[in-house]
Amino acid sequence: MREFLIIKDAEVAKLLADETRCQILNLLKIKEMSTNQLAKILDKPASSIDHHLKVLKAAGLIELTSERRRGNIIERFYKASARHYIVSYSLSEKAESSFKDWNEKLSEDVALLIQSFGYNISGISKLTRLIEEFNAFKRMVFEDLASSDVNP
């Protein structure tokens, strides 16, 4: 299992928006599991879990580790392809406008928090810009580190 998998395909990134798929990925990071095991833990139909597994496998987010025969049934076991999945900075850049409101709200909240300690904050727009720049820089550095073979 790789430590990091950087997702550079927007369609693959969209798969992570589904709560069930995220739950499956988190469970498969812990240990390999079968469709039936996942269905039991998540309290979902095995057919639904099987569909999610096929989609995740096709996207390269999970791997088939083994097949075991139980009578006439073949049970397939899967594991996560990586411990951490990172959506590429270039993809998140496209969604930057949707985070604008969130950054503004965060800036206002930070300004109010700082003011509650007795400091005067003028220029929330400057604070918003600094938060946006910090987040962009943090994503780039993290992706560069994750892409390299160097352990930080």
Image (tube, rainbow, N blue to C red):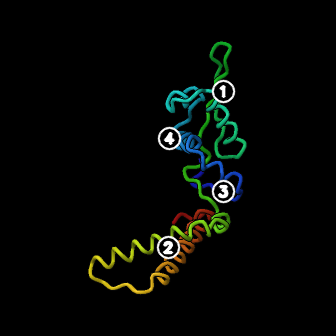
Residue denoted by label 3: 7
Left of 114 or right of it: where is 139?
right
Q: CA distance from mark 2 to mark 1?
A: 50 Å
Q: CA distance from mark 2 to mark 3?
A: 27 Å
Viewer-nearest of discs 2 and 1:
2
Residue at the farthest left position: 118
Marks 2 and 1: CB-CB under 8 Å? Answer: no
How dense is the environment of label 4, judged by Cα within 10 Å: few (below 14), some, or many (20 and up)?
A: few
**Relative to 142, is 33 above or below?**
above
Residue at the farthest top position: 71
Amino acid type shown at disc 3: Ile
Of callouts 4 and 3, the N-terminal one: 3
**Relative to 13, is 40 above or below?**
above
Residue denoted by label 4: 30
Viewer-nearest of discs 3 and 1:
3
Residue 31: image location, x then y, percent: 52, 37
Disc 1 secondary structure class: strand
Of callouts 2 and 1, the N-terminal one: 1
Q: CA distance from mark 4 to mark 3?
A: 20 Å
Marks 3 and 1: CB-CB under 8 Å? Answer: no
Of callouts 2 and 3, the N-terminal one: 3
Residue at 62% x, 69% y: name it: 97
Amino acid type shown at disc 2: Glu
Of callouts 2 and 4, the N-terminal one: 4
Disc 2 secondary structure class: helix
How dense is the environment of label 2, judged by Cα within 10 Å: few (below 14), some, or many (20 and up)?
A: some
